Amino acid sequence: MIGAGALLGLVGGLGAVLTVLRLPILRRVRMADRVAAPAVVMGIGRSGPAARRSLLQAAAVRLDRIVGGRAALSRRLDACGGVLSVEQYRASQVLWAASGALPGAALLALGGLSSRPSVSLAGAALVIAGLAGGVAARDARLSQAIKERDAAMLAELPAVADLFALAVAAGESPLGALHRVARGGGGPLRDELRRVLADVRAGTPLIAALDAFAARTSVTALARFLDGLVVAVERGTPLADLLRAQASDVRESAKRQLMEAGGRKEIAMMIPVVFLVLPTVVAFAAYPAFTSLSFVTH
């Protein structure tokens, strides 16, 4: 009875909170709602996919208000390539949260059908945990995607710097060399260079576009490369030698990181040797002695 009362109290409390949050006095009237008001008055409502899309957008807006950090999220999405907007990302978080809450909802329904309050309480707790876990899992996936993109750009940087240096040494202007390098292949770094070129075509100065690229990347070597490029364009200093030196520095940094990763893997490889291989060898070596001692005692 106590569990059933707690479950009823939880459901009633959630219903009361949702009712209060949906009161007209607490809702902010948007321009889209004012424009859509005549359609609602005339009986033109949303149905089917449009209604589901509207519900998903409302849930995404609610999640964005709860979580916050819109400016930081916008910078992270830019670092991931700017494929998703903040609203689209929040909508994907809502879908991930709904997927995480499905097992708890199934357990909650099972508890209601079997009249077991303990199962219902466990299902309600699992629903809350699944919602929070889905939001956190989507955020972790975004962080992992940013790391993978940064690693790919760092791997492309030496080749791009060498091509840029060759183009400049052959007589190309910095903008012409940027055009030549950007259309030379695929990859996240060249995608970002094409984004810089699109900004330049839209009227942004080349230096401002490069500064914006340096501001939205978290790769230190790439930011240093862009800063050197900006300084060279501003002051008219020779670019070829500078770009070759930066490409050499990036390659040396990659070698150093590879050696450090190899050292960490070497330490990790000692774990199965010490805790698995070595005890097995000792057991095989000591087994004849144990058997001979058993024969002596008999």
Image (cartoon, rainbow, N blue to C red):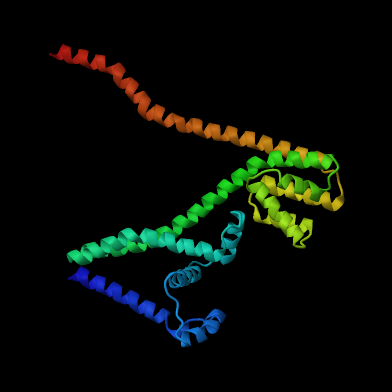
The quadrant in which residue 9 appears is bottom left
Q: What's the residue at 31%, 16% (across, down)? A: 285
Camera-nearest residue between 3 and 33: 33
Residue 16 seen in render? yes
Picture quarter with the N terminus: bottom left
Q: Position of residue 279 (x, y in %)?
A: 33, 25
Q: Is residue 238 left or right of residue 197?
A: right
Picture quarter with the C terminus: top left
Q: What's the residue at 72%, 38% (across, down)? A: 247
Q: What's the residue at 52%, 63% (across, down)? A: 88
Q: Position of residue 48 (x, y in %)?
A: 42, 71
Q: How many marks?
A: 0
Residue 116 seen in render? no
Q: Is residue 292 left or right of residue 284?
A: left
Camera-nearest residue between 252 and 15: 15
Give above or below for 15 relative to 261: below
Q: Is residue 219 left or right of residue 245?
A: left
Q: Position of residue 171 (x, y in %)?
A: 86, 42
Q: Position of residue 104 (x, y in %)?
A: 31, 61
Give above or below for 222 relative to 8: above
The quadrant in which residue 294 appears is top left
